[in-house]
Amino acid sequence: MDSIIVNPKNEKELKIVTELLEKLGVSNEVFSFNKREDFELLLNYFEAQQKNEEYEIPEEYYQVLDGRRAEYLKGNSRTSSWEEVKARVTGKRE
């Protein structure tokens, strides 16, 4: 099944859209900026693989990862266990 990506203008619009999807029984997930950035990188890599092209991760992305790691080491970022990550990926939340 195909999917759609919706980019609401603000928090109010995001809340309305997610509430509507939940009422309709449509599974959905809100992507944080970091998650969306990771997803875009993954898509670029996948598209390059489909075209049998080499894909080099941009240096800026390594800088982003270094920044995230620094925030994690300071205790300023949320972490997830492998079980939580697996549940998000498979859509099987408890």
Image (cartoon, rainbow, N blue to C red):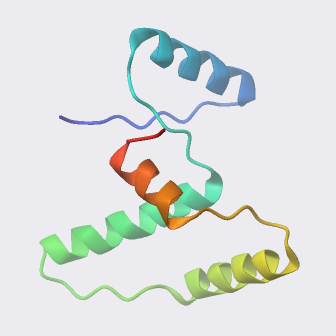
Q: In which quarter of the image is residue 27?
A: top left
Q: Is residue 72 above or below residue 10?
A: below
Q: Identify which residue, 70 or 46, lies in the foreground.
A: 70
Q: How many marks?
A: 0
Is residue 51 left or right of 74 when viewed as pictured? left
Split into 4 quadrants, where in the image is the N terminus? top left
Q: In this view, does 86 lie above or below 16?
A: below
User: In the image, what residue occupies the spot 48% across and 9% down?
Assistant: 23
Locate residue 46, reporting x and y percent: 25, 69
Is residue 32 left or right of 52 when viewed as pictured? right
Locate residue 30, reporting x and y percent: 56, 39
Locate residue 42, reporting x and y percent: 37, 68
Locate residue 39, reporting x and y percent: 44, 60
Q: Identify which residue, 50 or 23, lies in the foreground.
A: 23
User: In the image, what residue occupies the spot 50% across and 66% down?
Assistant: 82
Q: Identify which residue, 44 or 73, lies in the foreground.
A: 73
User: In the image, what residue occupies the spot 57% across and 80% down?
Assistant: 61
Is residue 7 left or right of 77 when viewed as pictured? left
Q: In this view, does 37 lie above or below 50?
A: above
Q: In which quarter of the image is residue 3?
A: top left
